Image (cartoon, coloured by chain):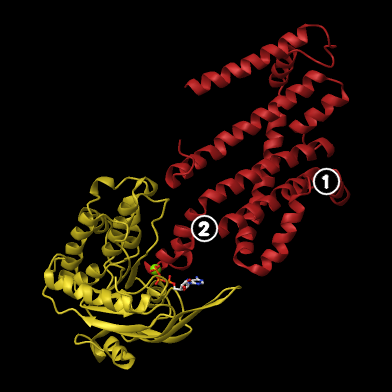
Amino acid sequence: MNMGEAQRQGVTSEHGSGASSKLIVESVSKWFRTPRATVHALDGISIEVAAGEVVCLVGPSGCGKSTLLDIIAGLTKPDSGHVLADGQLVTGPGRQRLVVFQEPSLFPWLDVFGNVMFGLKLCPELTNGERREIAHRFLVLVGLEKFERVHVHELSGGMKQRVALARALAADPQVLLMDEPFGALDAMTREHLYDDVQRIWRDSGKTIVFVTHNMREAVCLGDRVLLMSQAPGKIIQAFDIPLPRPRSIYDVDLVGHAARIADALRGTVGGGVPE
Amino acid sequence: MKRIVVSLLFFIALLAIWGIAASSGRWSPVLFPSPWSVAEYLRGALLDGTLVEAIYVTMKRLLVGYAIGLLIGLPLGLLVSSSQMLEDTVGALALGLQTLPSVCWVPLALLWFGQTEGAMLFVVVMGTVWSVIIATDHGARTIPPIYARAARTMGSQGLHLWIRVMLPASLPFLVSGMKQGWAFAWRSLMAAEIYVTILTGFGLGQLLHYGRELQAMDQVIGAMAMIVIIGSLADRILFSPWERFVHRRWGTNVK
Ligand SMILES: Nc1ncnc2c1ncn2[C@@H]1O[C@H](COP(=O)(O)OP(=O)(O)OP(=O)(O)O)[C@@H](O)[C@H]1O
Ligand SMILES: [Mg+2]
């Protein structure tokens, strides 16, 4: 494969160029130093995401996808390179870039409603009545309006993830960083949420970076799918997905695109061993 | 309901066995008084005010010493948890001194402060502060970092992060740390009251001490019973509501 070309493909896209870029990740590298070893997690990652674009990241487990999202969110500092959001250097987390984390991140001392309200209470422009109304609306969206007063530990894994999704969406960030948010959900709920994410995206024009292991999910949601290599993580290939929206994961063209990416991924992991 | 009945029956049975043993006449009633004479003593002490006065004096010392212990121990524990250097220094000191039974502080306190309230307070604070530091330090280290990470991406920082996230996230260990501190404060105060015989206040421990001096076994056992009752009541009133809150919210210890 032609690495140089792939890298270029990853950097530029038909949507994003120059001024309209919402997010610019520029040659970001990251090492984790532990007493036993030094892990090279990310190696010179460059991504440009246009405003209102959905970019999906796929790659083998442990290739640094979560680390990259952390760096974009401002939770982790890169060892070299930098991230620009709206042309501003990212130096720390901010509520314009919300993360739906891979692991459960709800606060156990608050009930479901309280968890969704947490982010809203940090939006000074809203009144309390508006906050309650918004929180309720997003809990309806993820189908949990009957569980508003339930404690977090009484929810199933998938329900927790839906609350986390509602919490992130309710706070209305410009950029959503989603780390395998649907991993623990059943197929039906997941497909339901694909429709919701596409609708929300269409209505609000949010910029989304979406990490997933599921190729069809990536192709269904993404304007572009970026394929990462095994650690140290690099962007090795970028796929434009020119399918019309809303997309269904049962669409034949969509499955074709997914198969193409899955083939490429297999090439990075198993050295091209056919299945 | 059934649990209350069972534990009530148990204690009634215990009293009955004590009563039967005392009335069997095998032991001198001076050394082994019956439940009735202890109850009689407690009633008398309650009526003439000595018991109420002793409880008041003891509780005052306990609350003041405990409050000082918490005021020093909680922030210090948080500090220790946030720095490896403090962990290796202050943390190690706390770990060492915590193994020292609080009664061992009494000679030092007497030499430094003499027979004063200060000596008493010193022993209680020394008994409390180390265990609070250790419990707080340990707890703060076990808060999952994901809570702070999630909150920070939502725009929480500084004071808001501490009050709205770190404080509630630390409730489970704060409660157990404060509870442990309370238990240690209570034990140290009793040690101090028995050994520091001052005249500025006459607490439960001193009641116990003078019971021995006067060979008044009913007073000794009566004071012991009061110490047990107050200790467990304080536990119920001060800590049970918090523990229940934590269990309900965190889903720990659900049956
Ligand atoms: N805090 C850390 N300390 C040390 N090593 C870390 C740390 N976080 C991540 N790593 C290492 O960095 C690499 C990338 O981890 P990361 O979590 O970003 O992978 P990922 O692509 O999200 O994997 P998955 O798909 O399984 O979630 C891994 O090798 C991991 O062991
Ligand atoms: Mg991950």
Q: Separation of disc 1 and disc 2 at Cα?
A: 34 Å
Is the CB of mark 1 within 8 Å of ligand 1?
Answer: no
Residue beneath disc 1: B104
Q: Does label 2 lie on the same chain as label 1? A: yes
Which residue was labeled with disc 2? B143
Q: Quadrant of residue B102?
A: top right
Residue A257 coordinates in the image, percent (x, y): 19, 75
Q: In the rendered view, would you say A259 is above or below B138?
A: below
* Crowd class of label 1 (few under 14; some 14 to 19; many from 20; radius 10 Å): some
Q: x%, y% of residue B209?
A: 82, 30
**Left or right of A1: which side holds B166?**
right
Q: Would you say residue B250 is visible in this rendering?
A: yes
Residue at the extreme bottom: A4
Question: What's the mark number on residue B145?
Answer: none
The earlier-in-sequence mark between 1 and 2 is 1
**A172 horizontally vs B90: left or right:** left
User: Label 2 is placed on what type of residue?
Assistant: Ile
Instruction: Please tell me whether residue B4 is drawn above or below residue B105 in the rendered image.
Output: above
Q: Residue at x 65, y 33 (%)?
A: B231
Quarter of the render that holds ligand 2? bottom left
Mark 2 residue CB less than 8 A from any atom of ligand 1: no
Which is nearer the eye, A204 or B113?
A204
Q: Position of residue A225 (x, y in %)?
A: 25, 78
Chain of the residue that carries numbered disc 2 in the rendered image:
B
Q: As shown in the figure, which amino acid type bears the numbered disc 1?
A: Cys
Shade of chain B as shown in the rendered figure:
red
Which hue is chain A drawn in?
yellow
Examine the rendered structure and indicate whether residue A118 appears above or below residue A210.
above
